[in-house]
Amino acid sequence: PAPVEVKLKDVPKNLEKRVKVSGWVKSRRDQGKDMVFLVLRDGTGYLQCVLTGKLCHTFDALTLTLESTVNVYGIINRLPEGKTAPGNVELVADYWEVVGKAPGGDDAYSSLFNTESNPDVLRRLRHLVLRGDTASSVLKVRSRTMKAFRDHFDSLDWYEVNPPCLVQTQVEGGSTLFALNYYGENAYLTQSSQLYLETCLASLGSVYTISESFRAEKSHTRRHLSEYSHCEAEIPFIKFKDLLDTIEGMVKGVVARLWDEPETRKMLVELNLRKNDEANDETKAAQIVGRDFADIKSLIEQPFLRMEYKDAIKWLNEHGVKREEDGKDFVYGDDIPEKPERYMTDAINKPILLTHFPRSIKAFYMQRADVSELKGYEDFMHDPPTESVDLLVPGVGEVVGGSMRIWDTEELMDAFVREGLNPETYYWYLDQRRYGTMPHGGFGLGIERFLAWITNRFSVREVCLYPRFTECCQP
Ligand code: 4AD
Ligand code: MG
């Protein structure tokens, strides 16, 4: 009979039917001369195919290499008791053909990289590393995560907008700007879409975007990229507390959405148990290290800890954490670097909404906090606290940054002067205040940091299709 063409994920629904499948040879095992087991991969799933007798004796069969593409025809059988294969089924082939043969010998897929390969090799071969189980699961989870964020905002009835990446204004300070020549004028790759989101409030109400942001980060760290996916939102007529609730609600909502999808949950659980290393999936999968994704699920079932910056400084000093540059105690006004931040978050071991950073270490647009509602700021009024927040999560540190925005025109003008920014290039941002201002706030979440957290990856590079960071713009 004519075969039904099926994707591998649909194979188990075609028991006892004759099918045609197409895919890449993920593994090959020979049993004597008359039997070859192939496991195929097609992006939707995996399938074991059995070739017997004549089918194993052709030149193609004798020289079939990993990652070659093949079409296989045959009957789908339930797997005999005691055997294991993906989906508990196998295809017993009656015909097969090679579509595209992959190289053997020194260039064989299996000899390109392994567990011991150094990161430079893995990076140069990223396009082939992507075919591994870990990388493909991470990319599938990434796809589901993007959808979960959109579904979450959709459930709130917020509009998605698409701000430009080519801009002439900085948002997060001059040191990380990528400058470019724009038809003879200066322009930059955007650091954040925030300012543009603010201009949408008056026509669309609450808005969000998932866009690329760019930062010329000179430091090599496991959580900094030069290009990253930035999920940002902006909300009119809110108070600072509403902003904190919104961020907490989003993170919990997205994790819950992912958890509720059986296939995604399965991938997340497996990834969390799998070592942070791309090569040689088979051996790594067997090593149980790290934590279970259930831990994250339980982390988000409790309220996030809310802590003021000044109390984090106190916490660090009480726990003997010193400044790297001079070995002294931290003081109010210090930026809390990545290491101490992660140390504190790991020690507390729950998500922390860290709030009220002093003005001097935050961006120009942040709204001053009303200190009459706060305690213990008498000595700090030279550098007043702002209505700002970072969400810190165990294992990663900061995943979200947000704030209430200065909504008064004069105050914003003062901020431009203080930061040495030219207000003329921000005329449109100022008009957002001039033409009907209101209290408002928003936040940005780094998709890669969020993914590194939920998939238990060591570096944000592991959750990118093709990571961009210092000295790496290829493939
Ligand atoms: O804290 P950031 O710089 O805040 C902003 O850009 C605000 N304008 C966002 C807003 O309020 N709309 O960046 C926000 C988040 C960080 O918390 C982090 O998760 C991520 O973006 N991020 C990076 N991710 C990867 N590589 C980098 N170099 C990143 N820089 C920031
Ligand atoms: Mg930040």
Image (cartoon, rainbow, N blue to C red):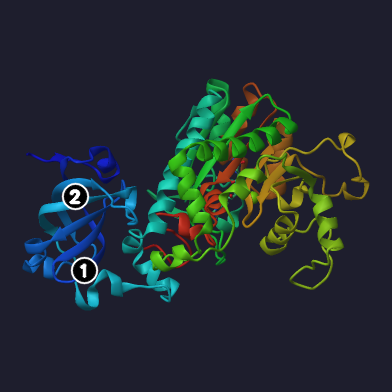
396 or 264: nearer the eye?
Answer: 264
Bin the neighbour count of mark 2 within 10 Å (Cα to Cα): few under 14, some 14-19, many 20 and up: many
Residue 135 position (above or below residue 206): below
Mark closest to the chain's N terminus, 2 or 1: 2
Q: Amino acid at mark 1?
A: Asp
Tell me the crowding category of disc 1: few under 14, some 14 to 19, or many 20 or more residues within 10 angstroms, Cα based.
few
Query: Which numbered disc covers residue 30?
Result: 1
Residue 28 figure quarter: bottom left
- Residue at x 32% of width, y 55% of height: 85
The image position of residue 178, as x and y in percent, is 49, 56
Kind of residue indicated by mark 2: Ser
* Left or right for 320, reference 422: right
Q: Indicate which disc residue 135 carries.
A: none
Q: Nearest the camera: 78 or 28?
A: 78
Distance between the alpha carbons at the discs numbered 2 and 1: 20 Å
Q: For numbered disc 2, what is the local secondary structure?
A: strand
Q: Is residue 434 above or below residue 137?
A: above
Question: On the rendered image, what quadrant is the C terminus found in?
Answer: bottom left
Quadrant for the N terminus in the image: top left
- Horizontal arrangement in the rendering, residue 210 relative to residue 29 (left or right): right
Q: Position of residue 10 (x, y in %)?
A: 27, 40
Corner quadrant of residue 136: bottom left
**Outermost bottom residue:** 106
Residue 348 location (% of width, % of height): 75, 54
- Identify the mark at residue 22; answer none if there is no mark: 2
Indicate the secondary structure of the residue bearing disc 1.
strand
Say which residue appears at 83% left-offset and 51% top-offset: 310
- The quadrant holding residue 319 is bottom right
